[in-house]
């Protein structure tokens, strides 16, 4: 029996423990892009491999996200297809029309939107990826509307960026560019950035320390802005 078959045979919590204990990642099986990974996960009903066992909501570590509040695999697969194959305006319109309204405010939806948009805006060869700043900035208004000043959703967007940075092996400048754009375009608040830095849940530890080290300049800039504001 293959590992995936064993995982599907178990309940989701047990399966998640087996997967994470193995140390495997989908990239180790040769999946080249986040789109390929998400297609595989969705088609095989292996969503639990994306979450650590007993994972919790970022802003409420004491509570587990109710299963009824999860972004569905079907919607996730549809989202990736829409954003990969359509122009920006058409993709936004289709996402608003096709994704069930009760799923659009869920952490999984925002996280996947940020992941797909970032993937679309990546440029460069396999050895060094960077964000096309102009292209990504064009999407920030849409991301901001989805987040709608929710700190929980802001954190999900940041954890999506952290995950991408980790999967790309921390390309120079990527996480800084993303942080400055999201802050300067008022997509993510200073409070959310600080919470991301200081209080990540256990399920979001992978790649976090390296991201924070790379963001020293960014957080120094935030501190400087605070000092200047207090003196004004």
Image (spheres, rainbow, N blue to C red):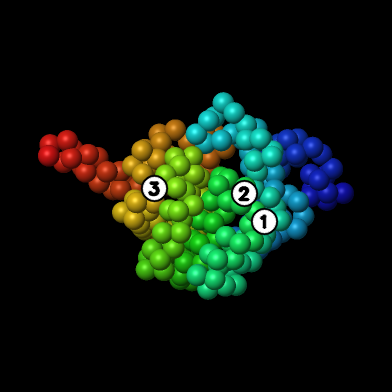
| Cα gap from disc 3 to disc 1, whole angstroms | 25 Å
* Residue 121 appears left or right of 53: left
* Residue 217 appears left or right of 81: left
Q: Quadrant of the C terminus?
A: top left
Q: Nearer the viewer, residue 98 or 7?
A: 98
Q: What residue lies at 35% left-to-right and 47% top-to-bottom?
A: 215
Q: What residue lies at 51% left-to-right and 67% top-to-bottom?
A: 120
What label sits on residue 199 in the rendered view? none
What label sits on residue 188 in the rendered view? 3
Where is residue 81? Give x, y as percent.
64, 66
Q: Earlier in the sequence, mark 3 or mark 1?
A: 1
Confirm whether residue 52 shows in the render. yes
Q: Is label 2 in a helix, a strand or a loop?
A: helix
Question: Tags 2 and 1 in contact by the CB under 8 Å rule?
Answer: yes
Write down the quadrant of residue 202 in the picture.
Answer: top right
| Cα gap from disc 2 to disc 1, whole angstroms | 9 Å
Circle 1 sits on which residue?
75
Q: Nearer the viewer, residue 114 or 33?
A: 114
Circle 2 sits on which residue?
103
How crowded pointer 1 is (Cα within 10 Å; few <14, some 14-19, many 20+) is rated as: some
Where is residue 38? Give x, y as percent.
65, 58
Q: What residue lies at 57% left-to-right and 54% top-to-bottom?
A: 112
Tag count: 3
In the image, farthest residue toward the right: 1
| Cα gap from disc 2 to disc 3, whole angstroms | 21 Å
Q: Is label 1 in a helix, a strand or a loop?
A: helix
Where is residue 98? Give x, y as percent.
64, 61
């Amino acid at each position: 029996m293959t590992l995936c078959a064993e995982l599907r045979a178990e309940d989701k919590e047990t399966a998640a423990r087996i997967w994470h204990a193995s140390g495997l990642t989908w990239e180790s099986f040769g999946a080249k892009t986040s789109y390929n990974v998400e297609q595989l996960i969705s088609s095989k009903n292996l969503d639990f491999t994306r979450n650590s066992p007993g994972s919790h909501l970022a802003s409420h570590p004491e509570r587990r996200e109710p299963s009824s509040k999860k972004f569905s695999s079907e919607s996730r697969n549809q989202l990736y297809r829409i954003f990969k194959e359509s122009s920006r305006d058409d993709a936004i319109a289709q996402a608003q029309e096709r994704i069930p309204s009760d799923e659009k405010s869920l952490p999984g939806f925002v996280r996947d939107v940020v992941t797909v948009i970032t993937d679309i805006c990546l440029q460069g060869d396999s050895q060094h990826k960077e964000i096309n700043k102009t292209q990504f900035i064009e999407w920030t208004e849409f991301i901001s509307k989805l987040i709608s000043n929710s700190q929980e959703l802001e954190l999900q967007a940041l954890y999506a960026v952290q995950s991408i940075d980790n999967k790309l092996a921390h390309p120079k400048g990527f996480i800084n560019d993303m942080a400055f754009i999201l802050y300067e375009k008022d997509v993510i608040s200073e409070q959310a950035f600080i919470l991301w830095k200081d209080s990540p849940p256990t399920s979001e530890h992978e790649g976090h320390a390296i991201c924070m080290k790379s963001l020293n300049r960014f957080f120094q800039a935030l501190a400087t802005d605070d000092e200047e504001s207090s003196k004004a």
